[in-house]
Image (cartoon, rainbow, N blue to C red):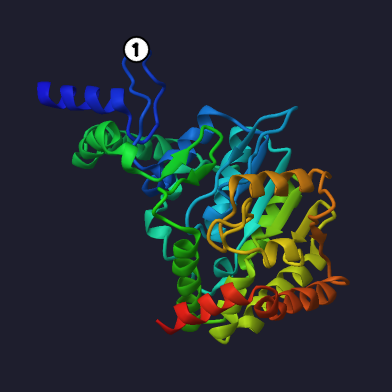
Amino acid sequence: MASLLCAASLTYIIDPYDLYPPLPGLSPGKTTDLFYHLRLHKPYAMQRTPAEHLIVGSSRSARLPPQRPDATGYNASLPGVSLSEIRRMVEHAHVIKPLQSILVGLDYYMFREGHKENERYYKDHRLLRQNSGPFDPLVYGYRRIEDYWLSLLSVDALLDSVDALHGAASSNRKFNVDGTWEAKFPPRVTPAGLYSMVTRQKYREFSTRTGRLDFTELSRLTAFCAENDIPLTLLISPMHGMAMNAVNAAGKWNDYLSWQREAVELGGNWPETVSIFGLETNPRIIHEPIEAADPFFQDGVHYTNNAGARIMQCLHGECGESFRLDKLDSASIDGYLLLVDRMMRAYPAANPRDYARLIKWLEQ
């Protein structure tokens, strides 16, 4: 018993998953690499810091700052998140505190039929329900005790506590209290190395996966927001021209355009409180050199911090001359996708040096 108390005290003080209130003078203020534990951390973090404005999406949305001068915000993005997880995170946040707005970053992979490859880490019991049954609070309380055990008395918690004290400095990720996170790489990791890794990953991903799409969960999400009168903004997460050409080389470019068209045309049945935006017609973003001084992309799909701030400023009406968001509907989507297609096809001539790199990487 004494050993269990000591172990629980140690893991509570260190709190490797950032679940508990800090103890002044005792808590080291360090965590293990939360990237692998965000599905444990974020549901409870959202309860500690109730927000009126929510951002949620994949890791590509993790750098969209949720702060607003007049209200609280939280970025609940998760790596490899599914649309069903997004819908449940939205419901969880709304039960905690009524939401005033939601921004969802959309990715092609979310609509792949049967996409659930990361849901093995997802535990629905951590998320509150709006219309809970009479036994749901009991189940939720029991399951939370299980998470207390996981975070205080498990062997993994002890090992992660040691990692938080001694290994956290080796992580290249920084996690912020507003839910955003960012990757900071040492100088030996170059933009070319990151682009090489991600573009080959996209090539393999689009070469081997099915093109069948499922929009059921998106419809359920928009229905929830409509029923609760919550304005919903959908952002089609952009890709750099190099990543676009990797998708084209995989023979799935038309699939990439088709999912955007289907998502927007589905919006014809949505209420006016739902908006959808794209930004893949900006040549300075899509054609930027991969070693640009102030890049929009870190690796071809993930934004930099400055890019995330620019996107949010533009959504709030402050776009600037060299940056724009296209508001999409069934009348404008064909013209928009025609411009996106031109952006992809113009990339080799606009950036021949980087395009030659892409060809070389895909041949390896």
Q: Quadrant of the N terminus?
A: top left
Residue nearer the viewer, 227 or 291: 291
Residue nearer the viewer, 7 or 221: 7
Q: Amino acid at mark 1?
A: Gly
Q: Quadrant of residue 144?
A: top left
Residue nearer the viewer, 13 or 360: 360
Q: Position of residue 224 (x, y in %)?
A: 68, 52
Q: Quadrant of the C terminus?
A: bottom left
The residue sitting at the front extreme is 353
Residue 94 seen: yes
Q: Could you classify mark 1 by the number of other residues whose Cα lies within 10 Å: few (under 14), some (14-19), or many (20 or more)?
A: few
Residue labelled with disc 1: 25
For the point 57% across and 64% down, the residue is 300
For the point 39% across and 26% down, the residue is 20
Q: Quadrant of residue 41?
A: top left
- Element class at badge 1: loop
Q: Position of residue 296 (x, y in %)?
A: 64, 55
Q: Position of residue 173 (x, y in %)?
A: 43, 44
Q: Position of residue 113 (x, y in %)?
A: 53, 75
Answer above or below: position of 56 versus 166.
below
| Left or right of 299 in this view: 321 | right
For the point 72% across and 78% down, the residue is 346
Answer above or below: position of 80 versus 184.
below
| Left or right of 118 in this view: 347 | right
Answer above or below: position of 200 versus 135.
below
For the point 81% across and 61% down, the residue is 326
